[in-house]
Image (cartoon, rainbow, N blue to C red):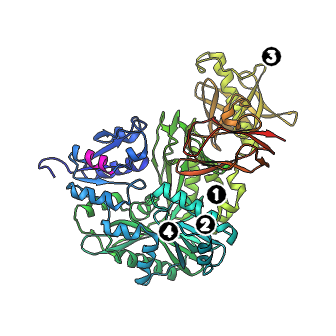
Amino acid sequence: MVPGRLPRVLVANRGEIARRIIRGAHDMGMDAVAVYTAEDASAPYVGEADLALHLPGRSLSDTYLNVAALVALAQQAEADALHPGYGFLSENPAFAEACAQAGIVWVGPTPESMRVMGHKVRAKETVAAAGVPVLPSVVVPAGMDRGALTRAAKVMTFPLLVKASAGGGGRGMRLVATAAELHDAVAAAQREAAAAFGSDEVFLERHLSSPRHVEVQVVGDAGGTVLHLFDRECSVQRRHQKVIEEAPAVLVDAATRAGMWNAATTAARSVGYQGVGTVEFLVEGGDFFFLEMNTRLQVEHGVTELITGLDLVGLQLSVAMGAPLPFAQEDITVSGHAVEARLCAERPREDYRPTPGTASHVRWPEGAGLRTDAAIESGSEVSASYDSLVAKVMAHGDERLVAIGRLTRALRALEVDGLETNRLLLGAVLADPAFRNGEAGIDYLDRRDDLRDATLPDDVRHRHAAAAACALLHGRAGGSLVPVPAAGWRNVGTAQHVDVLTDRVGTLAVRTGGVEQAAAVLVDGEWEEVGTARASDTYVDLTRDGVRRRYRVRLSAHGAEVNGPEGQSSFARRTEDDPAEQGGTAGECRAPLPGAIARVLVTTGDLVNDGDPLVVLEAMKMEHTLRATGAGTVGEVLCAPGDQVDVGDVLVVVEPS
């Protein structure tokens, strides 16, 4: 460290975790240095750092996955330490070694710890030798032929899981129901693992039908002290990635909980762990099994901070600088309950299809017991190049149901215009009796299409549509709210106006009049009164039967965003002719978002049925299978593996039967 200068940490990450580390560094009295690509130049975290350095290049391998470039920028910034965040290179031992060789403190565990725990097979062997319970598994060496694979699987029972040895987050993972599916599932997992982690090694593991996912936060220092910071429940998942987390875990008996704490610290000590880390378990009844250890800060670390009052980023920084842990196990206590929801730019009802775009307006909720760690603010761009997470909304309360209630209210109150998110899914989960009773296993969302397809109730949609139409009418009268003529909105008559509004569920016809006149929505050919509407430049009040609700409405040239006590709705002009939104004309398979073609599954002349897979598109760290929308014959294939495609690009043309 340079005499007379504050300690300086370079944050080798982006988005909400970069903001969190910058805040943690400032709280520790340190300077924080950000790195950014051209895409991230205007991101909030860049402006919040004391210094920001540009990462040249267009691909991840040139930028956030470029060890040499990141170390060089740390040296240029005269950084004393480097914090890798999570994801990207956060669990890469070669990155830690490169920092050490450059005289830069790595904020994380030793490279040796990461090598063991970063390889799932080796990790299981190591912790099992220390007495931690594990599930039986079989390694699949590279190049194993179909026959050898079938013989290797005979020691397992179906269904089983294929998992990547070198990574997690659901990438490189496949559930295999029968022996006939095994070869293709292994090949797909190997391909996805190689793309995500640079290694195609996979293994087979016993599958538990509906276990709970419970993890234990641990922290260790250079003196060999390893402590636990209690546990978290992470069972609500989509595509093997967490959606809602809470702390402490629910419906875990005291003996099982204590056993997991002991197993977690034992696992950490088996590799001489230093820093903050998480040991994950699958829990079935009173049994628990080691799943993996994440040798970094977790996305969901905030709920542990809320119940313990500890700053995990501050602990990481102080331990990395050589300080011993400032407390003993008995000094750490739990206060209340915390719940976190991951707000993602995605469309759950379409298999969680990512929805990148620009957030034209953002307002995060505030109030007692609330915390939001956000990647975006008003005007931020959510890129298709990265993970779809835009914010983590958290709530804390004295009791679990209080925390759930606060989080529910926070999700309703937040405002994100111009960006479709999974907010309705999150709200539906929080309201579901199975979740509220603590009964959700890791297959919970897979079994609940009703939650994935959640929409606002019709009466709520009608009120929101009426508020939008009333604001639009007021804007026309004032001539100031809509910057250009709003083509697609329809006016009828002089005393009353009928507006045709399209939201993400369907089309609504809304009839509005002047100030203090009734607003109505056309339902099954009949006009149903929604309430008496009154608009200002900012709000619309709807009153019916003495009950008044206030809506904040923002108008644009092509639509309206409505935020009310029940949540948010987005309305636009009709989109039947929008190929990017509707999937193109009949017989066309178009790219729903930017990405790379991973596989083409058909050739010209093939016969396909409705729902048959055509193309696999890789985007936002996931594979998306695009399917035929009707029966027919493949007329043209306009893409090839490796092609980069944009929204709306035609990939396959199917001539209808």
Question: Which image quarter holds the C terminus?
Answer: top right
The tag on residue 248 is 4
Question: How far is disc 2 from disc 3 in space, using C-alphas?
Answer: 55 Å
| Left or right: 564, with 266 as reference point | right
Identify the residue shown where x is 54% and y is 67%.
Answer: 163
Of labels 2 and 1, the one closer to you: 2
User: Badge 4: how crowded within 10 Å, few (<14), some, or many (20+)?
Assistant: many
Residue bearing mark 2: 442
Q: Which mark is residue 429?
A: 1
* First reached walking from the N terminus: tag 2 or tag 1: 1
The picture places residue 598, in percent across and down from the top left corner, at: 58, 49
Q: Earlier in the sequence, mark 2 or mark 4?
A: 4
* Magenta span of residues: 67-73
Find residue 526 and report its image quarter. Answer: top right
Residue receiving disc 3:
493
Q: Name the spot of residue 574 as percent of width and height, x first.
A: 72, 29
